[in-house]
Image (spheres, helix red, strand yellow):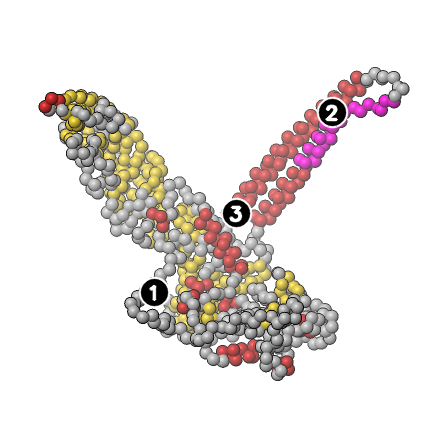
């Protein structure tokens, strides 16, 4: 039983972990293990990374997975593809083109009517001057005006119709762009499956895990509190966008701040030695290719040739080429299957001359520039190697020499002569000694075993480059376009806010996220936080009191930066930005001006001299601040002032107030040097006054930069 006829198991997407870019999906499949152990699990997306597939058995004992690989199948759809949106866009495009054509024709009619003017007959030299028929001129002018009025009225209607067609087309195009990519867009359905080999008997449940690009997320919050409560509800939500090619329906969502593309292998530490130069040690784990490896593919090289008639691109035979005798059609040999299901043209036997143009061997089509070229000649590969045909991904089998030609083909063909009869220069001989592996060949996790259809001596060897799949590359390119989506307001990407740590947030409920490349909101969970309301004012800058919330993170997980919607009771206040908050940290969230708390500030400066013969100038600054609480509840107001600081020993600053200097690191923010703070508790409907000041003593021969009389 082959892999294509293996027993099929349906799978269900169970959970998804969305990283900073990309996601890891987990699918579940169950069934009875067949006698040969070959199972095909269907339902995988086209954009998955084949190297990330992992499989394990979870629901049975005695059954294990011994092999897992990815295969792609393409089949025509039995029913028409659900492309109603695409057909709607095409219909609106036709309507828009028809409306534009009617408008252009109307503009042409207007230009024709505008060009109507009286043309007098040619006057001969001997003819007398004729009178101008004024009535005819006026009738023509009235006709042109009346005709233009009707045409312009119709022109306005056609312009409105064209505007409506443009609007309808833009709406339909936007819906098509935002539609889910889970449904096939053409009449061919591409199925990606995981072919597993199970060891054991009985029923088993298999868990598949794979990575996909095209998924991003940013955190958002919703904060609800009450004025008289010291705690609040902070709901963590996430805006998730994905274009992976499969709809996430009823899955468990987890959000991680880690980078999925970051390498996790350990760095290689090379030793540094002092002394004489020594040869580099042979890398451990690397072995030279075994002798006689090419003999393993002798049966592949002498396989029967393809049919005598050339094949059309659709696969059907056509008339034989000129010079070839008709004969029975030989069966098509099975195409060699390499890694990922792709294959290349099989090279002819070593030393066999290339088939002549017009012979039976050259009648088979060769892929060339995306089409079919029956006269394409094999192109020699590297010096000393086998000639190879111009090949593309999924190339057709090349012509092979008959087995009888192998007897006298012991030596390679002579080198072609250069123009003028001189022999062509011979290529440089390979370096002597054992082969030296490159750094890419030592990356064992990225090596791929090349199949028998590979060229250039790669058959049966491990190389780091895998066959290129243009269809899968196009799917991944479209999926990764979701990373260019504009972020919501105040949103910050997880890797920018979580610089030095990685954390994972698990959603409390399952969610649905279609593959449409737009933002969808998912509720992750509720985070208990400590809250206290404080009023803050800096009257020296602005005589306004601002209400703030001091938010304390009392959990063991960090809160990422993002937008937060603040709600007081049932009233929505505003949407502001929440900074990154470490466990146990505090931050201040501004709520805007508090109209019920008033502040007034007055200053006074008195300049005098002191000391022997007035050698010292004394600048006495006095500050008077009045606070009035007009709210119906007591409030705590923090008034900030700033005193000058100096590093000059000849300048002394003496403070005369009951304010205090804030301690750096004790509050939710850092303060500038010289900051002083008053903290006042105001009952409802009361007023208080704060007096402070400071003296600046400087030498009389010196002045402050900008003048002494400053507030």
Q: CA distance from mark 3 to mark 2?
A: 48 Å
Which residue is at 73% across, 31% downward? 112
What is the magenta range?
Answer: 103-124
Residue 462's tag is none
Please report whichever mark, 3 or 2, sits nearer to the chain's N-terminal start.
Answer: 2
* Front of the two marks 1 and 3: 1
- Residue 257, given in percent of the width and then of the height, sits at 35, 52
Quick one: label 3, few (<14), some, or many (20+) residues within 10 Å? some
186 up-or-down from 388: above or below: above
The reply, left or right, for residue 198 in relation to residue 587 is right
Mark 2 = which residue?
A: 144
* Front of the two marks 3 and 2: 2
Which residue is at 54% across, 55% downward? 184
Mark 3 = which residue?
A: 177
Which residue is at 64% across, 41% downward? 97
Q: Quadrant of residue 537?
A: top left
Which residue is at 40% across, 40% downward? 489
Q: Secondary structure at mark 1?
A: loop
**Can you name the residue that lies furthest to the right here?**
126
Viewer-closest of 257 and 81: 257
Q: CA distance from mark 1 to mark 3?
A: 46 Å
Q: Secondary structure at mark 2?
A: helix
């Amino acid at each position: 039983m082959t892999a294509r006829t293996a027993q099929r198991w349906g799978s269900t997407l169970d959970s998804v972990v969305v990283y900073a870019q990309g996601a890891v999906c987990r699918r579940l499949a169950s069934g009875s293990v067949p006698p040969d152990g070959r199972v095909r699990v269907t339902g995988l997306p086209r954009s998955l990374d084949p190297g990330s597939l992992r499989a394990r058995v979870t629901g049975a004992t005695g059954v294990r997975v011994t092999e897992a690989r990815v295969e792609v199948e393409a089949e025509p759809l039995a029913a028409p593809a659900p492309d109603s949106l695409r057909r709607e866009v095409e219909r609106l495009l036709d309507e828009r083109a028809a409306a534009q054509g009617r408008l252009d024709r109307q503009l042409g009619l207007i230009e024709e009517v505008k060009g109507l003017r009286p043309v007098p007959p040619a006057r001969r030299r001997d003819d007398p001057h004729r009178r101008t028929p004024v009535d005819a001129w006026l009738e023509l002018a009235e006709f042109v005006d009346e005709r233009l009025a009707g045409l312009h009225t119709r022109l306005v209607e056609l312009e409105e119709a064209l505007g409506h067609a443009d609007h309808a087309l833009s709406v339909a195009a936007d819906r098509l762009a935002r539609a889910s990519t889970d449904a096939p867009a053409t009449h061919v359905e591409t199925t990606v499956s995981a072919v597993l080999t199970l060891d054991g008997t009985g029923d088993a449940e298999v868990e598949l895990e794979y990575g996909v690009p095209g998924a991003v997320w940013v955190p958002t919050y919703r904060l609800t509190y009450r004025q008289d409560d010291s705690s609040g509800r902070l709901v963590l939500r996430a805006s998730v966008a994905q274009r992976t090619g499969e709809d996430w329906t009823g899955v468990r969502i987890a959000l991680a701040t880690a980078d999925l593309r970051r390498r996790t292998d350990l760095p290689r530490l090379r030793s540094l030695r002092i002394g004489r130069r020594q040869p580099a040690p042979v890398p451990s784990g690397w072995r030279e290719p075994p002798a006689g490896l090419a003999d393993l593919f002798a049966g592949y090289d002498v396989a029967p040739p393809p049919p005598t008639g050339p094949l059309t691109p659709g696969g059907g035979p056509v008339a034989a080429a000129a010079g070839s005798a008709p004969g029975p059609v030989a069966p098509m040999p099975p195409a060699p299957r390499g890694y990922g299901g792709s294959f290349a043209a099989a090279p002819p036997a070593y030393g066999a001359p290339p088939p002549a143009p017009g012979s039976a061997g050259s009648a088979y089509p060769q892929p060339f520039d995306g089409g079919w070229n029956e006269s394409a000649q094999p192109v020699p590969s590297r010096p000393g190697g086998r000639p190879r045909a111009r090949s593309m991904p999924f190339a057709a089998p090349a012509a092979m020499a008959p087995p009888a030609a192998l007897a006298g083909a012991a030596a390679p063909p002579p080198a072609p002569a250069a123009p003028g009869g001189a022999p062509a220069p011979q290529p440089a001989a390979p370096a002597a000694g054992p082969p030296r592996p490159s750094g890419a060949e030592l990356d064992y996790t990225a090596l791929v075993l090349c199949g028998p259809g590979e060229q250039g001596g790669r058959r049966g060897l491990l190389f780091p480059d895998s066959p290129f799949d243009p269809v899968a590359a196009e799917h991944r390119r479209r999926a990764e376009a979701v990373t260019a989506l504009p972020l919501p307001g105040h949103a910050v990407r997880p890797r920018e806010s979580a610089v030095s740590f990685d954390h994972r947030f698990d959603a409390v409920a399952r969610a649905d996220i279609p593959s449409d490349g737009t933002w969808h909101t998912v509720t992750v969970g509720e985070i208990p936080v400590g809250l206290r309301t404080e009023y803050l004012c800096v009257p020296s800058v602005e005589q306004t009191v601002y209400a703030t919330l001091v938010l304390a993170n009392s959990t063991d997980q960090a809160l990422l930066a993002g937008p937060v919607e603040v709600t007081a009771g049932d009233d929505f206040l505003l949407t502001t930005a929440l900074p990154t908050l470490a466990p146990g940290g505090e931050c201040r969230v501004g709520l805007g001006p508090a109209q019920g708390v008033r502040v007034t500030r007055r200053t006074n400066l008195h300049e005098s001299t002191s000391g022997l013969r007035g050698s010292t100038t004394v600048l006495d600054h006095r500050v008077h601040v009045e606070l009035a609480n007009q709210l119906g509840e007591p409030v705590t107001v923090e008034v900030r002032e700033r005193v000058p600081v100096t590093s000059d020993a000849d300048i002394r600053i003496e403070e005369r107030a009951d304010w205090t200097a804030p301690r750096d690191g004790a509050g939710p923010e850092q303060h500038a040097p010289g900051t002083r703070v008053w903290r006042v508790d105001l009952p409802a409907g009361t007023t208080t006054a704060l007096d402070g000041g400071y003296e600046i003593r400087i030498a009389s021969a010196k002045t402050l930069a900008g003048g002494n009389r400053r507030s």
